[in-house]
Amino acid sequence: LTIFPVTPAHAWGYVGHRVVCEMAFDMLARDKQTVVNELVRSFTKPNGKRFKRFSDSCVFADIARHNARDGLKRWRGYANFDHWHYMNVPRTTLATLPEFRAESIAENGFELVVGKTHLKSGVESHCRADCVLHAIAFHSRILADTDLPTARRGEALIFLSHWIADIHQPLHV
């Protein structure tokens, strides 16, 4: 009989999120990289600091989540996003992708699809506007709204990049 030690399963963590964002950033044309950097650098974190690199911003959602859970004064507003990192569905669920009924909005060279999310196959009863699919739709709409302040849109890009990495992470859906 061979006994193997059991080790805990870990999510991607900070390194995984940074790698996903670095890969996505590297795939952009230079002019689009400039827009991403401008948006990310426009956002001021609750501690008064700003991000220097897009890839570093991709871990912000986890930091905000932990600081909100710890009750840190300036971070409490992020408590609402606690369940937005994943989606719990029964094993019998066959479809988890949102069906976007949307219009296409071109802005600063980005093509974004925004609109209301209609979840298929009864998944909405599991999400209830409190899961990663809702988070992606929510922050996509904010990012696409050019009437909003740049810092607000920068925050949306920061969260959206994190959600996209989360949804591709094992055990998050």
Image (cartoon, helix red, strand yellow):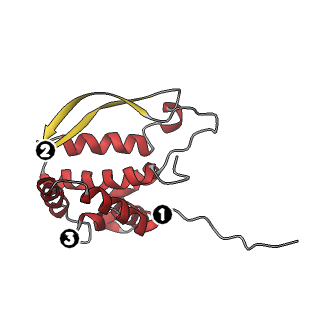
Q: Residue at x 45, y 63 (%)?
A: 69
Quick one: label 2 or label 3, which is nearer the N terminus?
3
- Which amino acid, mark 1? Trp
Q: Residue at x 20, y 55 (%)?
A: 154
Among all residues in the image, which is located at the extreme right? Answer: 1
- Residue 17 position, x and y percent, is 39, 62
Quick one: label 2 or label 1, which is nearer the N terminus?
1
- Residue behind mark 3: 52
- Tell whether label 1 touches label 3 (CB within 8 Å): no
Q: Sort mark 1 into few (<14), some (14-19) or many (20+) by Cα contacts within 10 Å.
A: some
Q: Is residue 21 left or right of residue 42?
A: right
As drawn, 117 above or below 12: above
- Which amino acid, mark 3? Lys
- Which amino acid, mark 2? Gly
User: Mark 2 against mark 3, which lies toward the viewer?
Assistant: 2
Q: Residue at x 29, y 68 (%)?
A: 56
- Residue 120 position, x and y percent, is 47, 27
User: Mark 2 against mark 1, which lies toward the viewer?
Assistant: 2
How far is the residue under mark 2 from the one under mark 1? 30 Å
Q: Is residue 54 left or right of residue 124?
A: left
- Residue behind mark 1: 12
